[in-house]
Image (cartoon, rainbow, N blue to C red):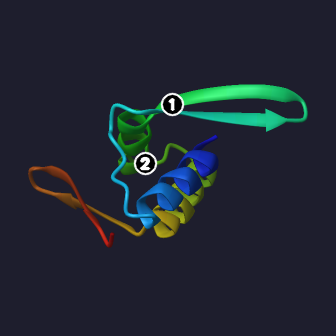
Amino acid sequence: MYVGAAVLSREVQGGGTAVSRGLTISVVVKHPDVQHKVRVQDFERWLESHGRTPAEMSLKGRLRELLGYEVARAVSGTTRNRDR
């Protein structure tokens, strides 16, 4: 689900359109038919948080790279810079 949200976000922003953080992204998997929804702000919050497992850390790293994120821990909290 998160990979689908990241790809959609990248494609929309690549076309010059800003993505509203309140937007809900719907991802549909055709076999078996499954639909997941995630708000952009929830996806970004999840992406900026630390992974709980090595697999989740790896997934978040790949998604951050896909989206051009630089996530750095600062004294005041998490900051995010995007290349786009």
**In x, y percent, where is residue 3?**
62, 51
Residue type at mark 1: give it. Val
Q: Which secondary structure lies at badge 2?
A: helix
Name the disc covering residue 3, or none. Answer: none
The quadrant of the image that shows the N terminus is top right
Residue located at (44% from left, 40% from top): 43
The quadrant of the image that shows the C terminus is bottom left
Closer to the camera in the image, 26 or 74? 26
Number of residues whose C-alpha sits closer than 10 Å to that of mark 2, classed few (under 14), some (14–19) or many (20 or more): many
Residue at the far left in the pictured view: 76
Left or right: 10 in relation to 75: right
Alpha carbon distance from label 1 to label 2: 12 Å
Residue located at (57% from left, 27% from top): 37
**Disc 1: which residue:** 38
Residue located at (46% from left, 62% from top): 64
**In x, y percent, where is residue 9?**
48, 52
**In x, y percent, where is residue 48?**
36, 49
Residue 30, compared with residue 10, is above or below; it is above
Closer to the camera in the image, 28 or 69? 28
Q: In which quarter of the image is residue 83?
A: bottom left
Residue at the far right in the pictured view: 31
**In x, y percent, where is residue 13?**
41, 60
Whichever of callouts 1 and 2 sits on the residue coming sooner in the sequence is 1
Determine whether label 1 and label 2 are within 8 Å by CB: no
**Disc 2: which residue:** 47
Residue located at (63% from left, 52% from top): 55
